[in-house]
Amino acid sequence: MTKTLLSIGHGFSARALAARLIPQGWRIIGTTRSDAKASEIAATGVDPVIWPGTDIGPILAQADALLVSAGPGPQGDPTLAGMRSDIATAAAHLDWVGYLSTTGVYGDHQGGWVDETSALTPSTKRGQARVEAEAAWQAIPDLKLHIFRLAGIYGPGRGPFAKVRKGTARRIIKKGQVFSRIHVEDIAQVLEASLAKPDPGAIYNLCDDDPAPPEDVIAYAAELLGLPLPPAVDFETAEMTPMARSFYAESKKVRNDRIKQALGVQLLYPTYRVGLNALLQEELQDRDVSDI
């Protein structure tokens, strides 16, 4: 029997999951705010729905699973604001609900390690909004909720190569700064594994095995491309947008043992080196195909 997944805010990570599920016979319904994006979604085999603007109740009634990628805004969680009562009504028959959160909920640990049991002490407004959103989702009775805390996402079209090629990349140096990352395909395989093995109430960190300073990633991208090392710039004097600067407010290494032990996941891209190599090879293959 065909199963149906409703994907709220059907974006980068959700599309990667859909590409895995559709060949298995899943029906994927993805929401978006624009007609243009609806056409893009439809081209991938997903049934697009414009929301807000569509009555979501009857669609939720058809769904076996719910994936929420849309993050909180200034007014809080937009999904709960627009469809909380519908979700509460559907909770009993939904087999699985996944909420994509962020490792930003842990706050700054000065380069130390965190896991799913670590205290939630965000130091940014975005991180605090995520903590509040997680709690709001957890408060819905009978909801078979799974929370996925994502590290920095990269993948096809989302990597450092474009800036390195343009010569606009910089190695921002802040002593002790370290980030964790996750390839979008590893996000997709974790979600797929969780769908196959639901564990309501579970929380998972999604990251690779190699947290690293951001300047190291930029340097490796330049090395792969055979281009000069981008200039080093001190964080304190670097010209950055407030958004970019806020990412440097927190430094931590994130443990991923739970996705391996509980879900049996073996990372496809366990380090940024493996991931960047793969992305470059994909780019070169796509270029070769387009030249034919």
Image (cartoon, grey):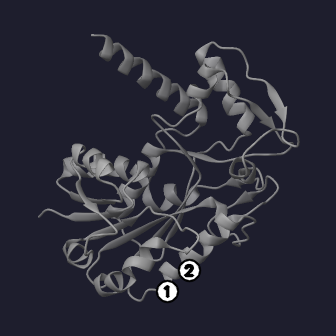
Tell me the distance, in whole angstroms, between the alpha carbons under discs 2 and 1: 6 Å
Residue visible at 62% across and 71% down? 129
Q: Quadrant of residue 231?
A: top right
Residue visible at 11% across and 64% down? 1
Q: Quadrant of residue 140?
A: bottom left
Toward the viewer: 197 or 180? Answer: 180
Relative to residue 163, is residue 103 depicted above or below? below
Report the side of 26 relative to 185 (left or right).
left
Residue visible at 36% across and 79% down? 83
Kindly tell me whether residue 240 is visible in this rendering: yes
| Residue identified by numbered label 2 | 135
Q: Extreme left residue here?
A: 1
Judging from the image, what secondary structure is the residue with disc 2 in?
helix
- Residue 52 pos. (x, y %): 34, 69
Which mark is on residue 139? 1
Report the side of 36 relative to 157 (left or right).
left
Toward the viewer: 54 or 18? Answer: 54
Relative to residue 245, is residue 64 depicted above or below? below
The crowding category of the residue bearing disc 1, from other C-alpha atoms within 10 Å (few below 14, some 14 to 19, many at least 20), is few
- Residue 133 pos. (x, y %): 55, 75
Kindly tell me whether residue 266 is visible in this rendering: no
Toward the viewer: 234 or 282? Answer: 234
Judging from the image, what secondary structure is the residue with disc 1 in?
loop
The crowding category of the residue bearing disc 2, from other C-alpha atoms within 10 Å (few below 14, some 14 to 19, many at least 20), is few
Residue type for callout 2: Ala
Residue type for callout 1: Ala
Q: Are marks 2 and 1 in contact (CB under 8 Å)?
A: yes
- Residue 117 pos. (x, y %): 65, 71
Which mark is on residue 152? none
